[in-house]
Amino acid sequence: MAGQRLAAGFLQVPAVTRAYTAACVLTTAAVQLELLSPFQLYFNPHLVFRKFQVWRLITTFLFFGPLGFGFFFNMLFVFRYCRMLEEGSFRGRKADFVFMFLFGGVLMTAPFLPWALMGFSLLLGNSVVTDLLGILVGHIYYFLEDVFPNQPGGKRLLLTPSVLKLLLDDPQEDPDYLPLPEEQPEL
């Protein structure tokens, strides 16, 4: 019964957040069960571009370390803030949300959320360099997406590729479409 409620609740989560969270949990479970090694997942330019291990471009953003306190906090923040973004700022714009992920992935090689995770890194005595990198990337995206286009003479510099919009966004209804009489709802 509780499992069914959990599954039903998870299915109500927006698609990109649900897919990303599930991929992170499944990747960590595969490492925990020793089906994969963390050494098969991390970003290594030599292995990506010389040995064509291109999966590393994605898996580096899916593994948050072994199961434990840090993993659960990271997943909690990833789930919460991705869901807030997808249901809020990116509502109805899945392609733009995925493009933001891709943009961030191009500019950094580690999957950390900004300020909250930096605070946890400090509390746990870890380096905050990657957290600061994530914050910088987020601010660059925000400036290019929300600030610069609204300035006098500004324009959008980050344009989501059409193929992502075609694959991920729901088709827009034509406001000038006039349905046939038999398709019109009865009053």
Image (cartoon, helix red, strand yellow):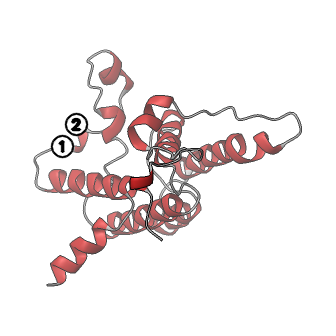
Q: Dot 1: what SS?
A: loop
**Residue type at numbered disc 1:** Ser
Q: Nearer the viewer, residue 180 or 151?
A: 180
Using the image as rendered, state which of residue 33 and residue 180 is in the foreground. Answer: 180
| Left or right: 59 as drawn, with respect to 129 | left
Q: Which residue is identified by label 2?
A: 40
Residue highlighted by disc 1: 37
Q: Position of residue 175 (x, y in %)?
A: 59, 47
User: Residue placed at 51% from the left, 30% from the top?
Assistant: 161
> Circles 1 and 2: CB distance less than 8 Å?
yes
Quadrant holding the N terminus: bottom left
In the image, 73 versus 80, the foreground residue is 80
Q: Is 67 rendered above or below residue 101?
A: below
In this rendering, position of residue 58 left or right of residue 28: right
Residue under the point 16% across and 78% down: 3
Horizontal and vertical percent position of residue 59: 30, 41
Q: Rate crowding at label 2 as few (under 14), some (14 to 19) or many (20 or more) other CA atoms within 10 Å.
A: some
Q: Which amino acid type is marked by label 2?
A: Gln
